[in-house]
Image: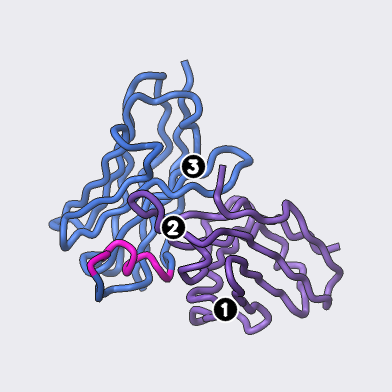
Amino acid sequence: QSVLTQSPSASGTPGQRVTIACSGSSSNIGSNTVNWYQQLPGTAPKLLIYNNNQRPSGVPDRFSGSKSGASASLAISGLQSEDEADYYCATWDDSLNGLYVFGTGTKVTVL
Amino acid sequence: QVQLVQSGAEVRKPGSSVKVSCKASGGTFSTYGISWVRQAPGQGLEWMGGILPFLGTTNYAQKLQGRVTITTDGSTGTAYMELSSLRSADTAVYFCARSMATYCNSPNCFKDYFYNGMDVWGQGTTVTVSS
């Protein structure tokens, strides 16, 4: 099982703001930056946020990330139907040999 | 714009091995790190390991140590992931992905390269393990 915990689901109506939380520990989020990925059904993941709050080129500014201590969050403002997807937090974990770890994932449903 | 193009679906019997390829199209990944990530049906993402082609170094998830081997062929711009001693729990979609970073400025190069995640992904390869 993953060392990063996310709520299984979140939902909102179009235009609303949805927040997804990601909880880790001192060996991962507590000491490293957080990335977020969006995975639309049947497709490969897409990097949405890197370095806690940076957006790669082409990612709308409706998506924003933040980190505090050993937790992080992704906010989607002005929710749109095309935002319905699975969202994963991820970071480097310094334990053992070090490895990249993903969160358990959150399914966002647009009502 | 570089794309990562993976090989097609595979079906294997328990105990056998599978080798999945990932070819860079429209560019090169020689200055990037390559990771392999898998996703079992209905499950989340799992990082399997990665390689820094220019250093020839690899890093594998502990649970897969001894069963997974990641390599690259610089002449063809192709990365490979081989998984042995297959079991039904290895049934999954396997993705290759390129690191966003292109530099190392600490003793932990793997961390430096994958710190900011992977920004280019292959389309995925379905591997089914069934008797």
| Count of marks, rendered view | 3
Residues at marks 2 and 3, common chain? Answer: no
Quote the CA–CA distance across marks 2 and 3.
Answer: 23 Å
The answer to which image quadrant residue A7 occupies is bottom right
- At a point 74% along the width and 60% down the height, the residue shown is A108
Q: Which residues are magenta?
A: B107-116
Q: Choose between B8 and A49: the one closer to the eye.
A: A49
Q: Give, as a three-letter code, the residue at label 2.
A: Asp
Quote the CA–CA distance across marks 2 and 1.
Answer: 26 Å
Q: Describe the element under mark 3 as helix, strand or loop.
A: strand
- At a point 70% along the width and 74% down the height, the residue shown is A75
- Earlier-in-chain disc, 2 versus 1: 1
Q: Give, as a three-letter code, the residue at label 1.
A: Val
The reply, left or right, for residue A5 in relation to residue B80 is right
Q: Which residue is mark 1?
A: A59
Which chain is in purple here? A
Which chain does the numbered disc 3 sit on? B
